[in-house]
Amino acid sequence: MLIDTHCHLFYKDLKNDLDGIIYRAAELGVSRFVCVGTNLEDSRVCLKIAEQYKNIYASAGVHPHDAKDVSEDYLDQISNLMKSDRMVAVGEIGLDYYRNISESETQKNIFREQMALAQQLKKPVIFHNRDADKDVIQILSEFPDVTGVAHCYSGGLETAGTFLDFGYYISFSGNLTFKNSHLVDVAKELPLDKILVETDSPYLSPVPFRGKPNEPGRTRYIAEKLAMIHNVSLDVIAEKTTVNAETLFGI
Ligand SMILES: [Zn+2]
Ligand SMILES: [Zn+2]
């Protein structure tokens, strides 16, 4: 059975159809999800969902887009949420220089502060990186005790190698299935014991659902693509990626 290690179930269309989503996911062999927060408000909803459904876990953190809006005591608030045993990681955190919705200096500060919090709480991080390889690598290197996952990986092989050297996992989403994706060549070179799968629902629907709202069951299509790339069965991918997620998140 597969684990969707990254979805945003707090969006209305997903939140209002959780039973349907869980049912359809089970039909596709996806049995557990991690609901990832992007700000304090979302993170609280993630926790509520995870308290309600035993196959859904949660994370709490501030996304780089939301970095500009944090309250003074946001770290204490994340820390408080992290006390729940349903909380498996700090995230999503990171840097996004593609959209630059928060200023880069602000993004870096908020990323660093949350890395320090993860270190203090001894929790893994779920990080987002878009067009910010150099600064992400710099900040990760400042916290050698922290581990986690490079979510929705979209970079090249060299950066992936650096993340692996730091002890991080690499997670692939629907963009692995897109036509002519350079990620196929990246995924081919990575060891299966360091790979996770995710949907990033409601974003990034895999082929053949591209452009439509995504949901956790579609983790199956990313796993199938990985199986093809690595020339192994879907069962092998399911077993490996599930053990990886269990190891990283302690579930
Ligand atoms: Zn992200
Ligand atoms: Zn996300």
Image (cartoon, grey):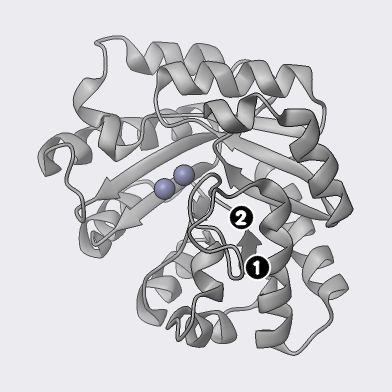
Kindly tell me whether residue 88 is visible in this rendering: no
Q: Position of residue 213 (x, y in %)?
A: 54, 48
Kindly tell me whether residue 119 is visible in this rendering: yes
Q: What amino acid does circle 2 point to?
A: Glu
* Residue 4 shown left or right of residue 214 in the figure: right
Q: Position of residue 70 (x, y in %)?
A: 26, 19
Q: Position of residue 44 (x, y in %)?
A: 53, 16
Task: Identify the secondary structure beneath mark 2.
Answer: loop
* Residue 16 shown left or right of residue 92 in the figure: right
Q: Which residue is mark 2?
A: 198
| Rendered position, 158 above or below 62 | below
Quadrant where the C terminus sits is top right
Along the viewing direction, whichever of 87 and 23 lies nearer the viewer: 23
Q: Residues within 10 Å of mark 1 (few under 14, many from 20)?
A: many
Which residue is rendered at x = 38% and y = 39% of the image? 93
- Earlier along the polypeptide chain: callout 1 or callout 2? 2
Contact between marks 1 and 2 (CB within 8 A): the answer is yes
Task: Identify the secondary structure beneath mark 1.
Answer: helix
